[in-house]
Structures are given as structure tokens and as C-alpha cells.
Image: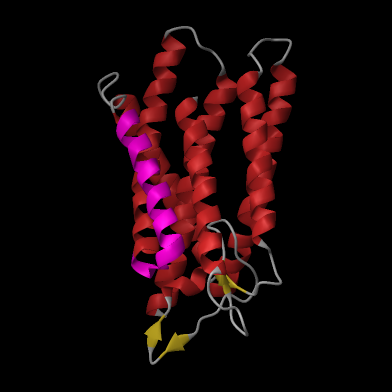
Amino acid sequence: MFVAAAGAYVNMVTHLFQVRGARGGGQHGCCALRPLPGGCRGAPRARKAGTARPHALTEAPASLSPPQFSLLTGFGALGLMVWLTATPHSKETEQKRLGMLAGFAFLTGINLGPLLEMCISINPSIIPTAFLGTATIFACFSLSALYARRRSFLYLGGFLLSGLTLMLLSSLVNAFVGSTWLFTANLYLGLMIMCGFVLFDTQLIIEKAESGDKDYIWHCVDLFLDFVNIFRELLMILGMTELFFD
């Protein structure tokens, strides 16, 4: 549980630092950096001297889809996740916890909305491509964890949390540096970390079930977070690739 909660928290704080870093620059007649789940209509395809701008994927008019919206839905989803964790699993609380799960999924979907809208404005085919890629990655890594030797991937927990901490620190640095390279490296690092979480969480759920933990609702949250974060990273990577090579 702590691993999933820490992952969601670091991911959200990473987005906050990216927004703060962009606000340091001028916004006269131009665009401001958005958090990872942010974005809006009309994402620019601008080139300068024939060179693509990978950061254009995260740029949008400041008057649309404010960062506060993404932070609000992110905090709401995190709050429901904490509430779900604090509510013990039982037959009496099952319906209540299912409602929390539905609310968590709803807020997470709203949080992804601006990014999806922005990807549509760049190239609508990005979304189905990212979804199919996410489904393939998720299925392959889940099957690998299922058929691998028991507990063989549980050692990854410490490395994955260290990777999340590294992402947080690099985002803090990038808030002052504004490096496109560091932003891109964070995306690929995030994708690798989330793939690792699929291996870790799948085997952890198996071990919990074997030991009598039948909290399927929280197990759904673990895997749902992994899927959504992989989807988000792929959307960003494919969008940047489209802008760079178009």
C-alpha cells in the first residue's frame, strides 16, 4: 500500500514542480508549461529555424486548463486513495469502498482529460496507439510476474521507490534549470519505473492473497495506478515524438 501511495504522491508533486518551473519564464504572447496530466486545445506545432520543440507538448495558453485544475483533481484522487486505505476491508464496508474506488477512478480520468484533449489536437491516433501500447506492456509484464518464480520481483520495491525519489529531485532541479533534456529523461525514467511496478505489484498481490489478504479493491487500485501512469507516460512520449518528427 505504501508503495502505491508514495508513487502517486511523488508523481503529483513532480507535476507541481514542472508547473512552478514554467511560471518563472515570461508568458507574454506565448505558452506556459503544464503539469504532466495537463494540456489543452490547440497544442502548438511551432518550429524555430526548422527545429522541433519537444516542450510544445506541455505548453498551452495560460487562460485554458489552469494547473490548479490538475492539482485539485490530483489531490482529490489522492484523498480518496488515503480514505480507502484507512477503511478496513469487510462485508460491511465493501459497498462504501467500491464507491471510493469509483470516485478515485473518476477523478483520475478527469485529471487525464486535458492531456487527452491536447493529444487529439496534435494527432488523434496518439490516443489509441498509447492505449494499445499500454495494454500490451501491462499484459506482458503481468504475465511475466505470474509465470516467474515466486517472490522473484519483490526485491524491486526499494529500487522503484528510489527511482521515484530521483524523479522528484530531478523535477525540482528542472524547475530552476528548465532543461528539455531532463524533462524528456524524466518521462522515460517514469515509464521504466511504472513497468517495474507492474512486476512488483502483481507478485505482491499474489503473496498477499496467499497469506489471506483478500482486499481485491485495494489490489485494483495498485494495478489501476500502474496502468494509468504507463498510459500517461506513453501519451507524453508519443506526443513529443509526433511534434519532433512531424
| Front in this rendered view, residue 206 or 44 | 44
The answer to whether residue 69 is above or below residue 3 is below
Quadrant in which the C terminus is drawn: bottom left
Residue lying at 52% horizontally and 39% vertically, measured from the top left: 8
Give coordinates of residue 42: x percent, y percent. Answer: 62, 76
Residue lying at 62% horizontally and 85% vertically, measured from the top left: 29
| Residue 6 in view in this figure | yes
- The picture quadrant where one finds residue 234 is bottom left
| Residue 105 in view in this figure | no
| Front in this rendered view, residue 217 or 190 | 190
Residue 178 falls within the magenta-colored stretch: yes
Residue lying at 69% horizontally and 23% vertically, measured from the top left: 97
Residue 174 falls within the magenta-colored stretch: yes
Give coordinates of residue 35: x percent, y percent. Answer: 55, 59
Say how the picture is coloured. Answer: secondary structure
Give coordinates of residue 80: x percent, y percent. Answer: 67, 32
Please indicate whether residue 113 sits to the left or right of residue 234 in the image: right
The answer to whether residue 114 is above or below residue 72 is below
Q: Main secondary structure of the magenta part?
A: helix
Q: Which residue, as the protein is rendered here, is positioned at the far bottom?
A: 49
The answer to whether residue 161 is above or below residue 43 is above
- The picture quadrant where one finds residue 47 is bottom left
Residue lying at 74% horizontally and 22% vertically, measured from the top left: 96
Give coordinates of residue 241: x percent, y percent. Answer: 40, 70
Look at the image and give the residue range highlighted in magenta: 157-181
Please indicate whether residue 70 sits to the left or right of residue 197 in the image: right
The answer to whether residue 115 is above or below residue 145 is below
How many numbered marks appear? 0
